[in-house]
Amino acid sequence: MQYLTIKDLHFKYPRSSMPIFENLSIEFEEGWSCIVGANGSGKSTLLKIISKEMKHQSGTVKGNDLSYYCAQSTETMPENLEDFMFTYTSKSFKIRDLLGIQDSWGYSWNTLSHGERKRVQLALALFEEPDVLLIDEPTNHLDNKSKNIVIEALKSFKGIGILVSHDRELLDTLSRSTIILKNQEIRSFKTSYSNAINEYYKNIEHVQDNKLKQNSELKKIKKSIQTQNEKVSQSKKRMSKKNVKDNSTKVKIDQARFTGKDKNDGQLVAKLKAKESKILDNNIKVEKTYKTGITVNVQRNRNIFPIVLEKNILKISEEKTLVSPILSINEHDKIAIVGENGAGKSSFIEYILSVTDLEGEYLYIPQEINEEKSKKIFDDINDLPREIKGEIYTIIQRLSSDSKKLQDSYAPSPGELRKLMIAQGLLQNPSLIILDEPTNHMDLDSIISLEAALREYNGAMLIISHDKVFLDAIVTGVWELEEESENSYLIKETSL
């Protein structure tokens, strides 16, 4: 049995005042384990440390000599792609069959969809046969067919697998143990994600109930101490011989002191304070929670609706074409754009933006943003006037991220960057929101908050997503890209 052991791990980004991990200790064994937590909690950072892509400040990581990290981003072509595509062995052919990798993908990376790129990434990871396989959001960008292909491929891995994902179906299908990162604390459960999260919230509820009982007991003790202190004060006044001239009264006071009647109240106060101190020493800590949920306002400066798209034939790649009929977007339409990976959904959005005059009236969040642009967006937001920046980070807080920790960081995670762009865009009160795979990289709490906000949004919306639950809650219509013939797709208006 193989083990991956992490002990007393400490890691802090150079520009950050707060550590991501402090004295983190955990052990992984063969089979799939999942790591879940809010954006910015350190999930991807932990994978990078295990794979040696990032170096920790102190502590030990053992059992990671042969590890492979499959990153979230699909922007960069993997270095070992050519070796894999030109290796003609039973192993390489088996992996290509498992993940449906086509021969042409080896020299057409720039024209592949993000979903196709993700399948290539996973194929290369399995091809390396590592002892420890680290997978970061593997079902981002994937349609249902591709997702099922990926799940079956990952089931074939026999080493130590560590998975970061917001995909509940994937987590429950693969993982045998669950790690929850929350508020710089770690909790480990030897069970699937759904069972673990239920147990986690039951524990939270139990702790909160005990905290209420503890606070109630402390309140009673404080009240009793106050009452007894008043009695002690009154007793001291009664026992004082100051200004007492009558000798018989002085004798009675001396007798009372001798019999110790004046000590009872003082001793009771001491016992109560000792009890209070014991409770405070065993103070129950309750996890910090933030109020979630955002609102989206619409403030139109000019009438851009209806937006009419003329019939057109779009060239998606050298081989693929997309036929677009006459389509229109009206003032309150919430339209899902769906279809298999590679059908041209993102290209169709780019076409819409190129042929319509929407300047200043829309918010567009693309699927992926490279690291350099991500850093620039983050720095630009932090350079905004204090009032505007405060509004943005208030929205971030309401989308289940620690805004103070994010501002203190060197760069946002992909999920946090998406939240920042959404927050900044929403302050402009857009008439049209265009989101390309908005739930990719986001934690579950954030997805729920965003879903509720978009459901209440009163403007027009175009959403590309493979998350059917998310779309069901929001959209009023569907544009589906269907394959009409080999390498030719047609857009059809339909329903979910």
Image (cartoon, helix red, strand yellow):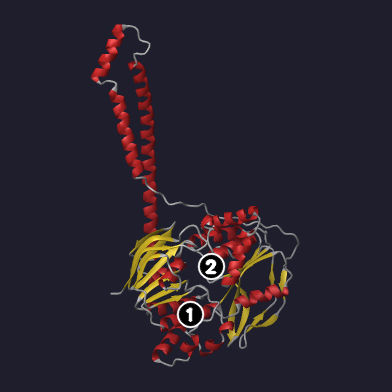
Question: Where is residue 397, by image quadrant?
Answer: bottom right
Residue 409 visible in the current orientation: yes
Q: CA distance from mark 1 to mark 2?
A: 18 Å
Q: Which mark is residue 21?
A: none
Query: Residue 39 appears at what percent x and percent y?
Result: 50, 62
- Residue 245 shown left or right of residue 409 in the figure: left
Q: Position of residue 276 (x, y in %)?
A: 34, 37
Question: Is residue 368 visible in the rendered structure shown here?
Answer: no
Image quarter where the C terminus lies is: bottom right
288 on left or right of 210: right
- Name the foreground residue: 397 vs 262: 262
- In this image, 165 relative to 332: left or right? left
Quarter of the image that includes the N terminus:
bottom left
SS at mark 2? helix
- Using the image, tell me which numbered label, if any, was put on residue 121: 1
Which residue occupies the extreme left position in the image? 259
Q: Is residue 290 above or below residue 478?
A: above
* Residue underneath mark 2: 414
Compared to 310, does 444 lie above or below? above
**Hey, what amino acid is under mark 2?**
Pro
Seen from the viewer's position, the closer of residues 453 and 204 is 204
The quarter of the picture where residue 187 lies is bottom left
Amino acid carrying label 1: it is: Gln
Lower sequence index among marks 1 and 2: 1
